[in-house]
Amino acid sequence: MKELQQENKECLTVLKPVLDAVIKRNPNEPEFHQAVTEVLETLEPVAEKHPEWVAAGIFDRIVEPERQIIFRVPWVDDKGKVQVNRGFRVQFNSAIGPYKGGIRLHPSVNISIMKFLGFEQIFKNSLTGLPIGGGKGGSDFDPKGKSDGEVMRFCQSFMTELAKHIGADTDVPAGDIGTGAREIGYMFGQYKRLRNEFTGVLTGKGLEWGGSLARTQATGYGLCYFMEAAMNDHGDSFKGKTVVVSGSGNVATYAVEKATQLGAKVVAMSDSGGYVYDAEGIDLKAIKEIKEVKRARISEYVNYRPNAVYTPGCKGIWTIKCDVALPCATQNEIDGESAQILIDNGCRIVGEGANMPSTPEAIAIFQSNGALFGPAKAANAGGVATSALEMSQNSMRYSWTFDEVDNKLHDIMVNIYKNISKAAADYGMKGNLVAGANIAGFEKVAKAMYAQGIAY
Ligand code: NDP
Ligand code: 2IT
């Protein structure tokens, strides 16, 4: 990966000093470097077209978070022992709206991962067409194996500090890896206690207390709406396709549901321990029971479907022959080797449900083999778009029906596809959805930053 980033860096001219400064100022942040490299590389023609943006330091400013908050999260476990985690909130860019982005709870969380996610979120949120800025937060807390009481005490302690920095018009966190309905509930309860305010400060809330219908389904459904629009544009569709979906969390589950509804057969899913292959098609009811109800491992799937096969190790999922790959677990889960295997097995359609799941080498392999490649910041924008719809409903003190939200989500995803295809074509890179997403996402934020001036 290092070599490729070096190569990309060499393609840069106007923006080379920007990337050099990012790497120098933020040592030991490989995921952040990776995300910035991918974006700057495709923005070079935009910088050439807009010297006024270069002169106003838009590129230098957009790669530096407006604010980064790092805090101690002490809590007491079930044995009475004091535990200490580290909490983060990166408020990256508020040019087009309040900071918006999820909270990741996973032992791997560090500032590099927070900043890559916050940076991606700026462009993704811009692509939704809704007024939301970019941010991300989280902690190295591992919810796996913790009791409900431990998760509650952690979430309360986390929110005790975070509450000082967020607000319905300032910064609105939501779910991500390890943060689902349960965690959002505990965090919302604590915010309300501290502030004595019932407000839309978090999204992904329960339906009884301000949540939006279809938010749970939104990222996975949105991914399929986006990929269906992309396939339709090439005279193709999900119908009759064999699909592999990695992960078995929120995004993966509802991607499987929608792909199946659109006529595809999903044959494999995974978790961090391994993957299951079910030639007859994944039984989503079993997955939901294992993951949403029991919070157990995907290896249990074979107890529900004796003909299915479980294989330990999550990378092997990409060796399964498929037409469509939907990585929905985590960053860099498809490396160059896995991408080549997918291509060799005939897969020509890839939609990123997770954030940055393909390494730069993998993206290069997909693109050079003419695959239809839907990049994360466009393809998985349905979750945050529906979060913004939740914010609208909270402001109106009103709720839309499931179909109303789902129809809006569908239209948003189709529009994202149209806008990024157009941006790619306008800059002479027809079909390059990576470039199209970066350019279309960036231009709106750049115009807003330019109009708002520089704070001296
Ligand atoms: P969940 O916590 O619900 O599920 C995550 C899934 O990915 C689990 O199956 C988990 O397995 C697997 N996974 C997580 N980390 C790793 C790892 N390091 N290696 C292998 N497998 C891993 O999270 P979400 O479904 O919400 O998020 C999945 C991805 O989608 C993330 O990249 C997230 O940033 C992105 N995303 C999420 C959105 C949302 O609305 N939730 C919106 C847009 C993007 P295990 O349980 O074994 O850890
Ligand atoms: O990566 C993402 O877009 C999310 N985790 C969802 C963020 C949100 O605010 O709904």
Image (cartoon, rainbow, N blue to C red):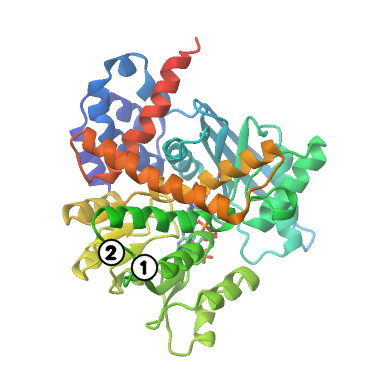
Q: The disc labelled 1 sits on which kind of residue?
A: Lys
Label 2 sits on residue? 338
Give percent across and percent down for residue 434.
29, 44
Q: Residue 64: which quarter of the image?
A: top left
Front residue of 326 and 12: 326
Per the image, label 1 sits on a secondary structure element best described as helix
Residue at horizontal 31%, vertical 30%?
A: 19
Q: The disc labelled 2 sits on which kind of residue?
A: Ser
Per the image, label 2 sits on a secondary structure element best described as helix
- Determine whether, in the image, residue 183 is placed left or right of residue 358: right
Give percent across and percent down for residue 311.
41, 79
- Determine whether, in the image, residue 227 is placed left or right of residue 85: left
Give percent across and percent down for residue 68.
55, 32
- Dot 2: within a 10 Å radius of its alpha carbon, few (fewer than 14), some, or many (20 or more) residues? some
Residue at horizontal 61%, vertical 68%?
A: 292
Give percent across and percent down for residue 279.
37, 82
Looking at the picture, does residue 286 appear above or below residue 438? Answer: below
- Determine whether, in the image, residue 433 is placed left or right of residue 129: left
Does the CB distance between marks 2 and 1 fall below 8 Å?
yes
Residue at horizontal 40%, vertical 36%?
A: 27
Residue at horizontal 80%, vertical 38%?
A: 194
C-alpha distance separating marks 2 and 1 = 8 Å
The answer to whether the residue bearing label 1 lies less than 8 angstroms from the nearest atom of ligand 1 is no
Q: Residue 349: which quarter of the image?
A: bottom left
Front residue of 248 and 33: 248
Label 1 sits on residue? 315
Does the image show residue 349?
yes
Does the image show residue 179?
no
